[in-house]
Amino acid sequence: MPDATDRRILRQLLADPGMANAELAERAGVTPVSLWRRLERMRENGVIRAVEAKIDWRKLGYEVQVSLRFTLDKTHPRAFDEFIAAARQVPEVTEIQTFLGSVDLRLSVIARDMAHWQQLYRESILTLPHVADSDALMLVSTIKDVQELPL
Amino acid sequence: MSVQPDVTDLAILRLLAEDATRGAAEIGRMLGLTQPATWRRIRRLTETGVIAGRRIVVNEAALGFGVTVFLGIRLAVKGRVSLEDFERAVMAIPEVQVVQHVLGQFDYRLRIRARDIADFERILRRRIMTLPGVGQVEANVMLSEERRPGPL
């Protein structure tokens, strides 16, 4: 379990994930060696699962981002597994979440433009298995996107 | 501005999207490039904003945040002023990690981190339901999440 010092390190790191280790050590009040050891340990025991590069899809020409919400036909016992397996085959799907609530599943899908979106929707989304109902939320703008936790 | 990356750039992005702590030397070895050539490409991808920073994926449950809820919010009144009031107030809630303005059945979608369901109820009642202009609210508790590499 992470102790108070680990939490202090994570609080700083989540607030500014690009921070250099020297600065992070100073802000968290630990020596660079101790910081390195603690980060290694948190990676080993899975408190830190990954450090990923964030990709700005707009810069790569993907202007459209859609949040697709699905209700599945749950009379089919393998509905979730088969839907997720099929969604993984669509390269433009960037996130898959499952839920407890009125929505069963959500996909984040990116497309180059509306023509590309239309094509994706018809060829790759409407063909996904066991869908009872779906609706789409088209992204206008992201107002906040942080990973900070009130630790 | 859109950048035209080549196949090698996309391979680099794929490796960094998995693990951003990989250095230019390691990536170069994996792709059969020299360390300086790889470093130049990474620098260009960073300078053009294709690489927009890092994301630390933590085991939030191990840190005492066991519940993630996605909220769909519909405003009761719409108009420029009410949007700004709503956005300013919702951004200030520490448990709200993501706020997106969307078109469709809802006006906003939110991602919220809570310690447990009781904590979520507190956030919902005291923080969300009291937001200016808030109308219909739909909550879905996340059970699992998978991030995909995307079209790289």
Image (spheres, coloured by chain):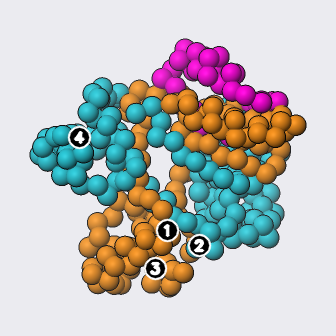
Chain colours: A orange, B cyan
- For the point 58% across and 48% down, the residue is B146
- For the point 78% across and 67% down, the residue is B117
Mark identifier at residue A46: 1
Which is more toward the observer, A52 or B95? A52
- Give me the C-alpha separation between circle 2 and circle 4: 36 Å
In the image, residue A117 lies in the stretch drawn in magenta: yes
Left of B45 or right of it: where is B140? right
- Give me the C-alpha separation between circle 2 and circle 1: 9 Å
**Labels 4 and 3 share a subunit:** no
Q: Which residues are magenta?
A: A106-135
Dot in front, 3 or 1 = 1
Image quadrant of residue B28?
Answer: top left
Image quadrant of residue A76?
Answer: top right
In the image, residue A114 lies in the stretch drawn in magenta: yes
Q: Are marks 2 and 1 in contact (CB under 8 Å)?
A: yes
Residue ID for mark 3: A6
